[in-house]
Amino acid sequence: MHILLVEDEEKASQYIKMGLSEHGFLVDLADNGRDGLFMAKEVPYDLIILDIMLPMIDGWTVLKKIRIEDKTTPILLLTARDAVDDRVKGLNFGADDYLVKPFVFSELLARIQALLRRGKQQQVDRIKVSDLEIDLVKRKIKRHGKRVDLSSKEFNLLLLLVRHQGETLSRTYIAEQVWDMNFDSDSNIVDVAIKRLRAKIGDSGDRKLIHTVRGSGYLIEEGE
């Protein structure tokens, strides 16, 4: 599942991202409302965690603009404001849930899982790219109708590429999302992982889906 976290407190955002990544979620970060709104419009996230007190554009405005466009992505408000009026305001603006800081991570995780279950019928549970099929619920892969066994990291790497189909992802971005690490330009961890993933899914010749963009990174798309 792909989550957008819009939070301007770096310590809090890294804490949440690390915890969610350990539970198999892909997490994108935005530290201001303007970037968060742009990302929410451009990427089909499964869930958005949105702080209210944000620079550039506040969370209320971001929430309203997302809902004006009829997006049904579940939105969880995460804020230090615990007044009843604020909670009612958030729900009236279209939020699906509201969690007050400080919080216990297990509660945040439980609320996220509940929101995802609630919207499960509206969500796509399978993704296909050519003859590659990903079952998001069971976390299973098939290529040309045959099962492919991947590790958790390999599954997350493939899903990241598929979620951004047709978009070139840098090695830095891939390392941050899949390994939750700062990318060392001398490290070949991403290249090695891509090589192994290609081998496992039989990605070569006319069946090649994962492409190297020299000097930029990798992308997944159907070959010509």
Image: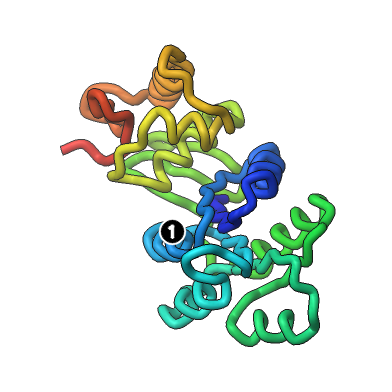
Q: Quadrant of residue 84?
A: bottom right
Q: Is residue 184 left or right of residue 83?
A: left
Asked whether 160 or 13 is in front, the reply is 13
> Can residue 156 be spotted in the picture?
yes
Q: Which residue is mark 1?
A: 35
Q: Is 197 placed above or below 97 here?
A: above
> Can residue 20 be spotted in the picture?
no
| Residue 156 locus on image (x, y percent) | 53, 36
Residue positioned 28% across, 40% down in the render:
221
Asked whether 72 or 136 is in front, the reply is 72
| Residue 117 locus on image (x, y percent) | 68, 63
| Residue 72 locus on image (x, y percent) | 51, 74
Q: Amino acid at mark 1?
A: Asp
| Residue 119 locus on image (x, y percent) | 61, 69
Residue positioned 78% across, 66% down in the render:
100
Asked whether 13 or 173 is in front, the reply is 13
Residues packed near mark 1 inside 10 Å, few (<14), some (14 to 19) or many (20 plus): some
Q: Is 212 placed above or below 107 here?
A: above
Asked whether 30 or 17 is in front, the reply is 30
Question: Could you say whether the residue bearing mark 1 is in a helix, strand or loop?
Answer: helix
Q: Quadrant of residue 4?
A: bottom right
Residue positioned 46% across, 35% down in the render:
158
Q: Quadrant of the C terminus?
A: top left
Residue positioned 57% across, 71% down in the render:
59
